[in-house]
Structure formats: structure tokens, C-alpha cells
Amino acid sequence: MSASYKRLALIIHVDHGAGRKLAISLLKIGLFVIITTKDQKIGEAILQNIIEHTKSDEIEYFPLDISIQSSIREFASSFRQVYSRIDLLIFNSAYRNNSLREKTFTEDSIEQNWASSHIGPILLFGLMLPLLKNSYDPRVLIHIPDSIFAFKHLKVREQDPEFRNCRYRGIRAYDQAILAQTMFIQYIANHKEYDYLIIMGIVTKAIRKPSYYNRTLPFFSRFNMRVRNIFLLSPQKAAWIFRFAGIADSHKLTSGQLINLNRTQIRPLPYARDKDAIERVMTITRKYIVT
């Protein structure tokens, strides 16, 4: 690899979790960073904050709503006009709608959690594959909240993944979307056509949210969130494990692994290790992607 080769990192969902801290961390070690957010005003404010903090202009911002397929395609088209490769693609934690009692649907008529935490990332991965192939050392990191491992018998509702024909629970919809992402990681790692890249899941506890995340909530809800934040994982610690997996020597990493903050391998849930189940879920997934 040429000494002048500057690695390029694309971070999705910088407006949530450890995204901002991760962007700053990667800038400080010499990577060029592209960030995305759903809300353009928040994204542009974060961009300016990062530039002021790091004194670096090796960063760019693109708006992207990962739950909407037209937004994903528009982003991918704009991105490919500027950049010819991606070295590090990071899917930071998607916004979760587990508090909703009533299910909501995107403009693609897909349940919000299923769209933003599973279908959208897979569509974007597919559109970015040609750019990943142009990298000397392409890596894909997907954030996996550790909450799903509390349910040993968790499965994807293969006949009704959007909860259209049953009682809806937002947290259940979110958890199964994340479970499907762990299966996607196994699927890519187990297919020889993707041997040129490393794909991993980064497993963490719930990450402390920035203050603006809950600024529209009532006073007591904001107060409760501040108290809850005391016990949540700091963005700095979460950013550290993403950085490790992003820059560590490739021989220290294994494609398909799920690792936690201690760099300990986390075994996927039994259902998520079943090859037949993985194939079924990926077949279901393809049906949601508009061609």
C-alpha cells in the first residue's frame, strides 16, 4: 500500500450513539471521514463542530435517511460521483422506534424498524460494494446492541416481519431487525464472493445519547433520560472498539465475528447461526428491496 494512501471511512447515523466521537477519533489518526445524518440541520451542525474540534477539513457531510430507499439511492449516486472507493463502512446504531405503541411505515410502506435497522443498511451495502472492491483493505462494521442476546429464543417473524397481522411491539420489531443484521453478517462472511472484505458486528451496551436527541421530550422525560444516561455506555468507549476494528491489522480480525468492548467474541443466537434460517431471512429481505 502506498504511503500516501489515505483511508476513507463512511459513517452512517452520526447523529446517534458514538458516531461523532468515532468521526473525531478517525480524523485524528489520519483517515478521511464522510458522515451522514437523517436531519440535515443536525448533520451540518455536527460537521462544523467536528471541524472546530479537530481543526481538520478532511471530512464531508451527506444527508441520508437510511429507512427510505429513494434517499439511499440518491445518496449512493451522489457519493459515487465524488468518491471511487470506500475503505471502512460503518453502520452506527439506527434510531430505534421501540417506544411506539402503533407501528409506523416509511414512504416505501415498510415498517419503520424493519426498514431502518435491516433493509436500508443492506441496500446501501449492495450499492457501495463496487467502491469497497476498490479498497486495498475493505471493512464493514455494523453496530449490534447487546440487548438482543437477552432473548435466547429470539427469531425473525419470517411469515410477518412487519407485524402486520399481529399485536405490534416496537421493541420486538427493533430486536428482530437487529437479529436479522447479525444473520446478514454471517451470510456475507460465509460466501466466497465476499472474501475480499471483512464484515463484523460490534456489540455494545446501550450508548448514551447526546442532549439534543431528547430535547423535544417533556421535562420529566428529559430528566429521566439524564438519570438513565449515567448508567449507559459512554460514546468514547463505544467509539474505541469501532476504531480498533477499523484500523487493526487484518490478521487480528475474522470476518463474520461479533465482538464486544473487551474484544471478546460473542456467539450469535442459535437461530442466527442456522444456515437454513439465514438463507430464508435473506430471501425475505430481497423481496423488500425495490429494483
Image: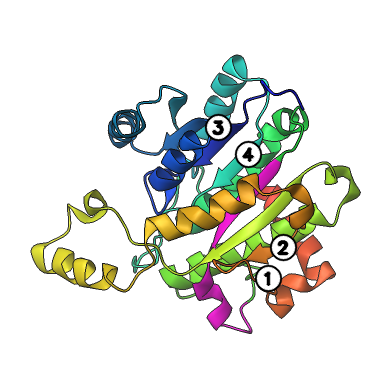
Mark number, residue 14: none
Tell me the kind of residue under disc 3.
Answer: Leu
Mark closer to the chain start, 2 or 1: 2
Contact between marks 2 and 4 (CB within 8 A): the answer is no
Q: Nearer the viewer, residue 58 or 157?
A: 58
The amino acid type of the residue labelled 1 equals Gln
How far apart are the two marked residues, 3 and 2, measured between alpha carbons? 24 Å
Q: Quadrant of residue 179?
A: bottom right
- Crowd around label 3: few <14 · some 14–19 · many ≥20 (10 Å): many
Front one among 95 and 250: 250
Q: Is residue 11 left or right of residue 286?
A: left
Q: Are marks 3 and 4 in contact (CB under 8 Å)?
A: yes
Residue drawn at x 77%, y 72% as measured from the top left: 273
Q: Secondary structure at mark 3?
A: loop
Q: Quadrant of residue 247?
A: top right
Q: From the image, tell me which residue sits under label 2.
A: 257
Judge whether residue 91 can be spotted in this image.
yes
Residue tagged by mark 3?
31
